[in-house]
């Protein structure tokens, strides 16, 4: 009898142990669960989590993430890490303006809280998506030692890699899901460099093993030569410069616009700049607001013809942001090795002028919102800015093409997508560098279709390297073309033909 009792007790203990370890390895951290979202009145279609992961204990360097669980099949759907670029821009750009779970309806006054509605084109419809503020100093991420804000490509990739290990330790139930890394603009550098770290970690047997499958880059900075040479052919093809000027600039510069070899080339390039100066660099079809006075035009009292106002309309109630970087960002300034000026540094002000980031700024600087989404208060991380000048960032990883070659040749899938009306990182550069990799064409240039309409064009290469354009879209594809963006995103992640 006594023996049986001991066995029974041991068995019970064992059961408890098993149960405890089951709970420990199966459950996301309850403390990170978001229980209410100021401005949102309804029921969330899936769980949301947010918080900090410490990537360097001794210096107190902490990266902030917001995790939206998939609304489809969380245990099977991929885990996607989303990164905005800049450098210096918060991934809440993607969350608020592009493919996040909500449509933000602006409050009555600039500082009042927006009202949140569900976004029918949220990327959380088909994926578990993690929005990461990176590097430290950007968005809600910060460090106990501000010298960490002097950083670059390689350190950013290394920190994000550390973040991933610690994040998957917190959410072990997602470790076996297919994992993808996705981003746009300067994340054209973040995505391949981080993917490379992840792939190297897998090769070296680092635990836990991430189930990394591939990556996507949208209108991404890639290579100073390809990106630098992209503008002139784009401007000509789009009908923005004359045939004569195109012939002159081509013959004077001999196809090298990136690094003008002569004064005559330089002077032709200046003529190109003059022609393009008044355009909205993020979408050449969109109006450009020349100066703070015209901000008034944004707020209803508009002199814009209806045909122009309609350009910013999408199937989402959230309008495309009014932008006027077209005036500020010098043309022909591709990212080169060395210090990369952030927007505020470039504009020599403390914030990005004249871009309408009001809704995000009002929401993310509200203390009640910050508490609800587990971000530190203003005393600890300062005001949230869409793009910050707080960091000093060095482009120290060179061209991304060697990273793309390495990753694709190892079997990782890559989708390179371009809004074809973006003049910031024009599709002509991405089209040229993907071709230059030299892989066999396995799916020759063809339209891809959404709702019986041509949504853009696609060329597929061997090694699962795919290049697509999104017709009529500007720089931030999911903002300009939410429906088409969710379509190609879903098809590609599901491994279907786009
Ligand atoms: C929230 O829901 C309540 C009850 O349904 C409604 O009266 C109120 O207007 C809603 N508020 C917002 C901001 O949608
Ligand atoms: C911050 O880091 C720098 C460089 O590692 C170090 O020299 C400095 O002492 C640190 N400052 C503080 C306050 O810890
Ligand atoms: C990719 O990079 C790794 C690490 O540097 C290297 O060992 C490997 O040979 C490279 N593979 C290819 C196919 O370039
Ligand atoms: C392309 O991706 C598929 C699905 O992941 C994989 O089975 C195939 O081996 C890949 N092809 C190449 C050439 O890497």
Image: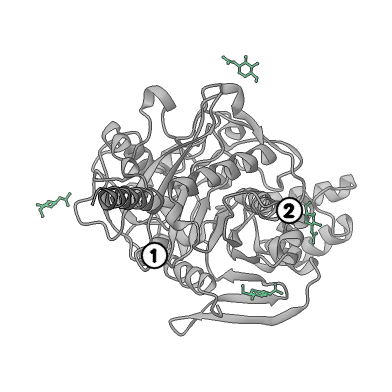
Closer to us: 27 or 482: 27
**Quick one: which residue is furthest to the front in this view?**
1
Q: Quarter of the image for the C terminus: give it.
A: bottom right
Q: Are marks 2 and 1 in contact (CB under 8 Å)?
A: no
Q: Residue at x 45, y 57 (%)?
A: 174
Q: Residues within 10 Å of mark 1 (few under 14, many from 20)?
A: some
Give how far across and how far down residue 312 sits, in percent. Answer: 42, 60
Local SS, label 2: loop
Which residue is label 1 attached to?
A: 314
Question: Residue 467 occupies which quadrant of the picture?
Answer: bottom right
Residue 385 is at least partly visible in this image: yes
Q: Is residue 3 left or right of residue 64?
A: left
Give how far across and how far down residue 422 sits, in percent. Answer: 59, 59
Q: Residues within 10 Å of mark 2 (few under 14, many from 20)?
A: many
- As drawn, 53 above or below 461: above
Spatial CA distance of label 2 from label 1 is 32 Å
Question: Residue 68 occupies which quadrant of the picture?
Answer: bottom left
Classify the position of ligand 2 by quadrant: top left, top right, bottom left or bottom right.
top right
Q: Residue at x 47, y 61 (%)?
A: 478
Mark 2 or mark 1, earlier in chain: 1
Q: Is residue 6 left or right of residue 201?
A: left
Q: Total of numbered circles in the picture?
A: 2
Mark identifier at residue 400: 2
């Amino acid at each position: 009898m006594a023996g049986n009792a001991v066995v029974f007790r041991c068995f019970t203990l064992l059961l408890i142990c098993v149960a405890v370890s089951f709970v420990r390895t199966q459950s996301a951290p309850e403390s990170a669960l978001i229980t209410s979202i100021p401005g949102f009145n309804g029921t969330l279609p899936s769980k949301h989590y947010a918080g900090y992961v410490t990537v360097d204990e001794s210096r107190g360097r902490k990266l902030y993430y917001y995790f939206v669980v998939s609304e489809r099949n969380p245990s099977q759907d991929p885990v996607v890490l989303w990164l905005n670029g800049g450098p210096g821009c918060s991934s809440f750009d993607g969350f608020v303006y592009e493919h996040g779970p909500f449509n933000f309806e602006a409050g009555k006054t600039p500082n009042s809280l927006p009202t949140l509605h569900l976004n029918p084109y949220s990327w959380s419809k088909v994926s578990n998506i993690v929005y990461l503020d990176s590097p430290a100093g950007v968005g809600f991420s910060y460090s106990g030692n501000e010298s960490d804000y002097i950083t670059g490509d390689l350190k950013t990739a290394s920190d994000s890699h550390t973040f991933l290990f610690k994040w998957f330790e917190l959410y072990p139930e997602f470790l076996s899901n297919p994992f993808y890394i996705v981003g746009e603009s300067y994340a054209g550098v973040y995505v391949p460099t981080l993917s490379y770290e992840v792939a190297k970690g897998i090769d070296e047997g680092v635990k836990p093993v991430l189930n990394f499958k591939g990556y996507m880059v949208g209108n991404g900075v890639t290579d100073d030569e390809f990106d630098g040479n992209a503008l002139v052919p784009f401007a000509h093809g789009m009908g923005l410069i004359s045939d004569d000027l195109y012939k002159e600039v081509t013959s004077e510069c001999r196809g090298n616009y990136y690094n003008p070899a002569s004064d005559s080339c330089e002077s032709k390039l200046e003529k190109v700049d003059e022609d393009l100066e008044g355009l909205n660099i993020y979408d050449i079809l969109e109006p450009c607001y020349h100066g703070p006075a015209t901000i008034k035009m944004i707020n209803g009292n508009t002199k814009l013809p209806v045909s122009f106002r309609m350009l910013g309309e999408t199937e989402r109630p959230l309008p495309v942001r009014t932008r006027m970087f077209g005036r500020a960002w010098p043309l022909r300034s591709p990212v080169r090795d060395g210090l990369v000026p952030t927007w505020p540094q470039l504009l020599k002000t403390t914030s990005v002028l004249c871009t309408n980031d009001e809704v995000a700024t009002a929401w993310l600087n509200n203390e009640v919102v910050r508490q609800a989404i587990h971000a530190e208060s203003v005393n600890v991380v300062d005001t949230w800015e869409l793009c910050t000048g707080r960091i000093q960032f060095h482009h120290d990883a060179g061209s991304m093409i060697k990273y793309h070659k390495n990753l694709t040749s190892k079997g990782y899938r890559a989708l390179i997508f371009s809004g074809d009306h973006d003049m910031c990182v024009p599709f002509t550069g991405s089209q040229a560098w993907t071709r230059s990799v030299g892989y066999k064409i396995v799916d020759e240039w063809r339209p891809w279709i959404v709702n019986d309409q041509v949504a853009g064009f696609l060329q597929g290469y061997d090694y699962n390297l795919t290049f697509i354009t999104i017709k009529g879209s500007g720089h931030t594809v999911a903002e300009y073309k939410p429906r088409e963006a969710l379509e190609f995103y879903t098809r590609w992640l599901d491994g279907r033909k786009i």
